[in-house]
Image: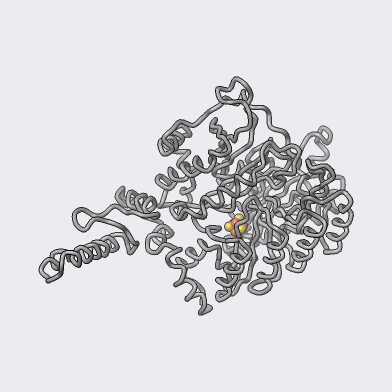
């Protein structure tokens, strides 16, 4: 095309413009249509701009003979943010999105979901899980206007709203913006909701307030397009060392507040320990890298870790595309050397012998009344049936927060929330108002640690009705094992994606089709694992039963708990 232009009668400036236009078209053809910068002539232009890091990784994969998986091809064909206006126009028709557009909508926080596949679910982003009461009530109003009259607290201390009709998707997202919230990047191959200690700033035990760190990282990633479209999803958590676990060991990157002692080779005081590679569904928990960071270094280091992952994560096989697999192939030292190269400096390391032991957590800290570090104030944990609240309950809960607490509602990874800043004189009122809503601040040993993923009623991957079965198991155990006097975590997850992290539960159930009869028929059921743990006892559980019918699971859980009670050496011996 440049040669053709030379023969025509344009002035020099017009030719420069048209040659640049021609090279843009050529580059776009080479890359499947994405906008790229480049020279007017010569060899193919290198990708530039915020997508370049991804395009180069894809190019390398192709050059090495790899076949990009569908999701990579979709990202390459149209950046989901550039496709936004087209997506809105198509959603307004009320039609189901094509698979590639379903994937693209997830960049905007909307998920076209099972079982009926007629509506979207919206997953928000709530850094450190904390909302103002008016935001909480506002989400309830939005759910009523555009979706279902209920919401769920997720295992990333977040909220999800369901049954949003296609043409209501964008108005729902616009409503979130009005509330100062966003759902951007909450699905697909992006960094998920940033979790932090729910009791940040109110916990006598905490070493560090995680709120500014979680919020700062949330804003860092939201405002850098090159950090979207990773090889796979990515989780980051900040643990402040408080009494309530935040499960950072199940995240790709976990930052743990620690106290470094004298003689460690770095200044004594509060640091963040870097743990990497957690992905409990793949039977791996994040491990200590030996690296310690000052809190203000976390963003830059997490950014560098991500860019190494973006460049070297697998783009061909969705089952091997999480960061864990780069770490497995390379080992920590090679990965950290690549991170240091990006940063242009060495990271600080300390021997674990020079770190003060971390204080133990409390498995009941997210339930009931607990004194805050501030004299005369309390946090109160409200139990939700596997995370579910109606919109009427949400508005009433928001009112309780504003009238009796500090106006904040703090979600936890245990699929519930806490009120904070409740004066001693208001505690009884909060408790009675919560009970009047059909909820409770007191939980049995089984309900306090009951976690269930979305399951069959809203997720196409589910092999079982996890939320329904969780409630049946809890009711059965309360009646059949009244002697249970310690918290036991039971996690039900619908498939290998492990959203409810069954491998770290004392008892974990993962959905499985159970064969019945001789004609290939199946019924819902679970494989059962035991002995998982987290916080001071991190451990991947061991499978003990395969393909147990759902109807038989309550009896199996009962048997496990009765065996534990019979064999334990007093209350101090945990189930694990
Ligand atoms: Fe869906 Fe599987 Fe996640 Fe459950 S664990 S919500 S079934 S993807």
Q: Is residue 353 above or below residue 217?
A: above
Left/right of residue 153 with respect to residue 194 in the rendered view: right
Which one is in front, 455 or 46?
Answer: 46
Which one is in front, 490 or 172?
Answer: 172
Left/right of residue 198 with respect to residue 113 in the rendered view: right
Quarter occupied by the N terminus: bottom left
Q: Residue at x 80, y 35 (%)?
A: 568
Q: Residue at x 31, y 59 (%)?
A: 31
How many marks are shown on the rendered structure?
A: 0
Which quadrant of the figure has residue 184? bottom right
Residue 443: horizontal and vertical position, in percent?
82, 51
Q: How is the image coloured?
A: one colour
Quarter occupied by the C terminus: top right
- Is residue 294 visible in the rendered image? The answer is yes
Left/right of residue 288 with respect to residue 535 in the rendered view: left
Residue 348: horizontal and vertical position, in percent?
52, 29
Q: Is residue 100 above or below residue 272?
A: below
Which one is in front, 554 or 25?
Answer: 25
């Amino acid at each position: 095309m440049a040669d053709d232009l030379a023969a025509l009668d344009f002035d020099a400036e017009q030719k420069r413009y048209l040659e640049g236009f021609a090279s843009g078209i050529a580059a776009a053809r080479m890359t499947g249509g994405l906008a790229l910068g480049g020279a007017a002539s010569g060899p193919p232009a290198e990708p530039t701009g915020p997508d370049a890091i991804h395009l180069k990784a894809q190019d390398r994969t192709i050059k090495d003979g790899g076949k990009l998986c569908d999701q990579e091809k979709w990202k390459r064909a149209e950046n989901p943010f550039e496709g936004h206006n087209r997506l809105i126009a198509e959603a307004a028709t009320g039609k189901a999105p094509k698979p590639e557009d379903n994937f693209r909508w997830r960049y905007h926080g909307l998920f076209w979901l099972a079982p009926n596949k007629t509506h979207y679910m919206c997953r928000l982003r709530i850094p450190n899980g904390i909302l103002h009461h008016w935001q909480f009530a506002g989400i309830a109003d939005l759910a009523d206007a555009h979706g279902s009259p209920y919401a769920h607290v997720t295992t990333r201390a977040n909220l999800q709203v369901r049954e949003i009709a296609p043409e209501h998707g964008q108005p729902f997202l616009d409503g979130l913006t009005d509330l100062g919230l966003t759902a951007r990047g909450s699905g697909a191959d992006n960094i998920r909701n940033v979790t932090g200690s729910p009791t940040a700033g109110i916990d006598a035990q905490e070493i560090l307030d995680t709120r500014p760190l979680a919020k700062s990282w949330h804003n860092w990633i939201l405002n850098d397009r090159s950090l979207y479209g990773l090889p796979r999803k990515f989780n980051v958590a900040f643990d402040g060392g408080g009494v309530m676990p935040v499960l950072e060991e199940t995240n790709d990157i976990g930052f743990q507040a620690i106290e470094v002692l004298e003689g460690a080779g770095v200044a004594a005081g509060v640091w963040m320990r870097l743990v990497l590679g957690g992905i409990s569904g793949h039977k791996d928990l994040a491990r200590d890298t030996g690296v310690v960071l000052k809190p203000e270094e976390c963003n830059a280091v997490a950014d560098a870790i991500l860019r190494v992952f973006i460049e070297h994560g697998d783009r061909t096989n969705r089952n091997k595309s999480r960061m864990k697999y780069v770490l497995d192939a390379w080992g920590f030292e090679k990965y950290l050397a690549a991170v240091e190269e990006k940063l242009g400096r060495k990271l600080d390391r300390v021997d674990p012998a020079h770190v003060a032991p971390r204080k133990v957590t409390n498995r009941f800290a997210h339930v009931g009344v607990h004194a805050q570090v501030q004299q005369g104030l309390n946090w109160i944990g409200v139990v939700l049936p596997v995370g579910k609240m109606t919109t009427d309950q949400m508005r009433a809960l928001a009112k309780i927060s504003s009238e009796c607490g500090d106006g904040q509602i703090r979600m936890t990874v245990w699929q519930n929330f806490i009120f904070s800043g409740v004066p001693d004189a208001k505690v009884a009122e909060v408790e009675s108002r919560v009970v009047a809503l059909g909820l409770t601040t007191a939980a049995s040993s089984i309900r306090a640690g009951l976690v269930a993923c979305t399951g069959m009623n809203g997720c196409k991957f589910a092999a079982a009705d996890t939320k329904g079965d969780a409630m049946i198991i809890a009711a059965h155990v309360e009646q059949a094992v009244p002697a249970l006097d310690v918290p036991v975590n039971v996690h039900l997850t619908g498939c290998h994606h492990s959203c409810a992290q069954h491998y770290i539960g004392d008892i974990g159930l993962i959905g499985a089709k159970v064969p019945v009869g001789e004609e290939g028929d199946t019924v819902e059921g679970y494989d059962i694992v035991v002995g998982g743990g987290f916080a001071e006892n991190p451990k991947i559980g061991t499978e003990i039963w395969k393909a147990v019918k759902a109807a038989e699971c309550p009896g199996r859980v009962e048997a496990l708990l009765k065996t534990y009670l019979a064999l334990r050496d007093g209350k101090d011996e945990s189930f694990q």
